[in-house]
Amino acid sequence: MPVVSRFLFALALLTPLTPLVQAAPALWYYWRSTVDGARVCAQTSPGQGWQRDSAAHEGPGCRPRRKVLIVPMR
């Protein structure tokens, strides 16, 4: 089997996997119940009767996003 056809065969096998490599974790949000005002932290809506109540958070438990400080070198 020539080298070019081996390369094309490998490329054809790996192409469907590219969306998996580019995937990122979903962001976390606080959700508020429209029924009793309860608040819960989740990546997706807990169901009907819930409204998103905050900006995006980075990790579980609705931790705030990390702040990156850039310090110039001297």
Image (tube, helix red, strand yellow):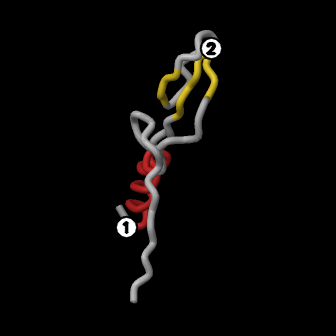
Left or right: residue 30 compared with residue 68: right
Q: Mark 2 Cα within 10 Å, few/some/many (few <14, many 20+)?
A: few
Q: Residue 35: image x %, image y %?
A: 62, 10
Q: Residue furthest left?
A: 1
Left or right: residue 23 compared with residue 1: right
User: In the rendered view, would you say 62 is above or below 10?
Assistant: above
Q: Which of marks 1 and 2 is nearer the N terminus?
A: 1
Q: Mark 1 Cα within 10 Å, few/some/many (few <14, many 20+)?
A: few
User: In the rendered view, would you say 68 is above or below 46?
Assistant: below
Relative depth, front residue between 27 and 20 = 27
Give, as a three-letter code, the residue at label 2.
Gln
Q: Which mark is residue 48?
A: 2
**Residue at left offset 62%, top offset 14%:** 48
Q: Residue furthest front?
A: 37
Label 2: element kind = loop
Label 1: element kind = helix
Q: Residue 7: image x %, image y %?
A: 40, 62
Q: Residue 3 carries which label?
A: 1
Q: Quadrant of residue 6?
A: bottom left
Query: Can residue 42 be seen at all in this image of the molecule?
Result: yes
**Residue at left offset 61%, top offset 29%:** 52
Q: Quadrant of the C terminus?
A: bottom left
Closer to the camera: disc 1 or disc 2? Answer: 2
Q: Which residue lies furthest to the top in this view?
A: 35
Relative depth, front residue between 18 and 51 = 51
Give, as a three-letter code, the residue at label 1.
Val
Q: Residue 71: image x %, image y %?
A: 43, 76
